[in-house]
Image (tube, rainbow, N blue to C red):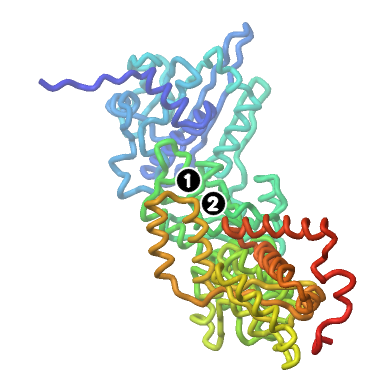
Amino acid sequence: MDHRFQVSLRGVIDLLSHHLYSSPGVYVRELLQNATDAIRARQLLEPGHVGTVRLELMEKQDGSPPTLLFTDDGVGLTEEEIHRFLATIGESSKREALETRRNDFIGQFGIGLLSCFMVCDELLVVTRSARGDGRTLEWRGRHDGTYAVRESEHPLAQPGTQVFLVARQDMTEWFTLKRLRNLASHYGGLLPFPIQLTTDQGSQRLDTDGAPWRREYESAAERRKALLAYGRSLFDMDFIDCIPLRSTAGDVDGVAFVLPASPHFNARQKHRVYLKHMLLSESAENLLPDWAFFVKCVVNANALRPTASRESFYEDESLAAAREALGQGLRAYLMELAREDPRALQRLIALHGLSVKALALDDDDFYRLVIHWLPFETSLGMMTLSDYRRAHPVVRYTSTMDGFRQIAQVAGAQGLCIINAAYTHDTALLEKLPHVVPDAQVELFSSADLPQSFEELTLDEREATFPLLRMAERVLAPFRCGAVVKKFFPAEVPTLYSSDAEGAFRRDAERAREESDDLYAGVLDGLMAAADGEPAQLCFNLHNPVVRRLAAVADRDMMKLSVEMLYVQALLLGHHPLNAQEMVLLNQGLLGLISAQLGGDAGNGGEGSGGAGPRGLH
């Protein structure tokens, strides 16, 4: 035996008020939507019909809750339609024609009228159909799920619908003149039909002059000024520019405003969107591509599908196509800036560089236009890629922040310009360069490449530093690190630790192995065994006074201790985490130096032995 679902209207209303709609005030939006759809439906029958929406607030002298009368001169309802559409949750008067005439109506779900039960316990709908027998009918619905239909004793003179709402005692705040005026203007400010609000104090018209981006202006400058003023009034923000938006997909048009400050790169801008000139949402997030977080927009869509709450758009092919078209409009704006006003583009990049970089990665044509305007951090300071390539034919970069920090000071002192591509999108942008710009050369640079630019020693200098080099090779062998002595700047840097990518991987794996259990340690052993690459290298700087004095030290123990400490210092200066063996070296070295000083023995490297260097060092 089959049974029918039993629906609790009170439960449905609670669901709507707490989970579907954002606030009780949406009842005004839903009534405006129903009135608008009714007027549009009548215009299909009578093309010359204009239509008007009226709100009348009737406040009681005895202090009882006020009544709101909502009136439209739309198509009205027949008795069959009353039973079908007002008393059946999920049925929509527009559903039958939805696929063929989606652009004509806003409502699609048949639940909008229920929002009124968030603010009142009973609804009275008085209606006369333009397609019916001329009778005026009354539908009285209650929040407990019961309703009654009868012929009205007060017939309407013309087709249309009246909705009477008596405010619930705890909801009277939503029935004040100020609140109704704000809600009606907020939701229906762009509707093509007049909205009249009447109280005991008189009547006033609430509608505006329509979408400002569709108006005619005397000049482009006047248009820009008017749209920026409109954006300021909507969002309480002074924008730096405005961009027209248009998409045939979804029949969308509007304007995007360029933000005056850069948002967080994960931030998603919330946009103000209208559906057939009725405000849908002030916080729509899925309208523009993810990279377009540098703009905030207001648009109207005539052919996009709303969600059940009518507070955002349904994610479907039409929305995806509209999003792509709107993104193309933003691309066109940026490309025009790159061609016609590069300084304006530079200012925009300074504010919204991350968004511009994301777009450049996605669009080769836009990449060609903007890549040389993008600024990069280098070992010689900030510069655009254009400035970099004019002075340096090969673009060299590091892909990690630690990698850049390890070489930046020394590379800059040698006149080497290395880009720090550790920031979001920078590595991908530089790697893309030779694929889009045919004559470009791009190389990944590491600390292992740096000693190749250093000055070699003379024969006498090699002979004088040979004992230091031999000691260093012996001390550093257990750490898979070689030694070399060269001359480089800045002179205050005594040593430089360098390794290639394989060496860096081995260091990380060794450190992880020390902290792992036996199973994972075995896996890491296999990885380290498969890792090739050159050993790391510690380069001593003969320009440094300490290194020159160390080369002349006769005490082998002091030389050994000094090499160990210089090795650890080089690791720390290069932002390399120390493994357990190196931590032991650091601790022993510090204790050894303290012990040596306490014993009054400076290792022949103190005042008496360090004045003149060995033969061959000048």
Q: Where's residue 406, x and y in %?
A: 66, 68
Find residue 585 and report its image quarter: bottom right
| Residue at the limit of the structure toward the bottom, as seen here | 459
Q: Of the residues shown, which amino acid type is indicated by label 1? A: Leu
Of residues 201 and 317, the one nearer the viewer is 317
For label 2, the crowd category at 10 Å Cα-Cα, with few meaning under 14, some 14 to 19 and many 20 or more, is: many
Does residue 203 sit above or below 435 in this rendering?
above
Q: How much space separates mark 1 and mark 2, taking CA atoms? A: 9 Å
Q: Of the residues shown, which amino acid type is indicated by label 2? A: Val
Q: Residue 275: which disc?
A: 1
Does residue 96 sit above or below 117 in this rendering?
below
Q: Where's residue 432, x and y in %?
A: 51, 76
Residue at (29, 24) in percent of width and height = 83
Q: Where's residue 6, x and y in %?
A: 26, 19
397 relative to 616 in the view: left or right: left
580 relative to 111 in the view: left or right: right
For label 1, the crowd category at 10 Å Cα-Cα, with few meaning under 14, some 14 to 19 and many 20 or more, is: many
Residue at (72, 83) in percent of width and height = 465
Does residue 329 sit above or below 196 in this rendering?
below
User: Which type of secondary structure does the marked residue at label 1 adopt?
Assistant: strand
User: Which type of secondary structure does the marked residue at label 2 adopt?
Assistant: strand
Q: Where's residue 463, x and y in %?
A: 72, 89
Residue at (64, 79) in percent of width and height = 470
Residue 335 visible to an observer of this rendering: no
Find residue 133 and report its image quarter: top left
- Give the labeled residue for mark 2: 299
